[in-house]
Image: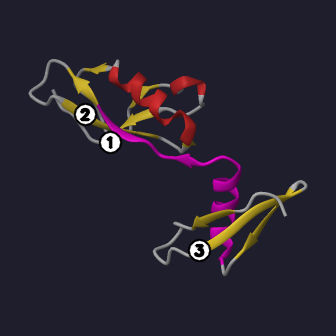
Amino acid sequence: MEKTREIICITCPKGCDAQVWQEGESIKIKGKICKEGKAYLQQEFIEPVRVLTSTVVVENSRATRLPVRTAKAIPKKQLFQCLEEMMKVRASPPIEMGQVIIPNILNTGVDVIASDDLPV
């Protein structure tokens, strides 16, 4: 058995404990884990991903910040780099929820989108 990681599944509120390791090409999981949990644990073991939520600066508006998020999960190792890119952005109204604010951030194939409307 290679290096084993203890991971808590966050797929549902139960927070099940699991041991995860790799044997050859397959990922092994020990613990009472549901089907959805197995997929999460495999992804978390191979390459953790997260949806990033933050804000960007707004210009020409009474609002000073616009809430944004990645449209899908991105590799956890790129979170801080993405935050640095978000700090460079200046958004101007009108903005609709779901509107792309940063396309394809850091060539991840994932857009950063507005999480709220910002009228003129």
Residue 102, x across and y down, in percent: 43, 25
Write the residue at 60% across / 31% down.
109
Q: CA distance from mark 3 to mark 2?
A: 37 Å
**Which residue is labeled 1 in the image?**
115
- Label for residue 66? 2
Write the residue at 55% across / 42% down.
76
Residue type (three-letter) at the residue carrying disc 1: Ser
Q: CA distance from mark 1 to mark 3?
A: 32 Å
Whether residue 52 is situated above or below residue 3 in the rendered picture: above
Residue 30, x across and y down, in percent: 73, 75
Residue 113's quadrant in the figure? top left
Q: Is residue 39 magenta?
A: yes
Mark 1, Cα crowd under 10 Å, few <14 / some 14-19 / many 20+, is: many
Upstream in the sequence, badge 1 or badge 3? 3
Residue 45, x across and y down, in percent: 68, 55
- Do the CB atoms of the residues marked 2 and 1 lie less than 8 Å apart? yes
- The answer to whether 43 appears left or right of 106 in the picture is right
**Which residue is labeled 3 in the image?**
17
Q: Quadrant of the N terminus?
A: bottom right
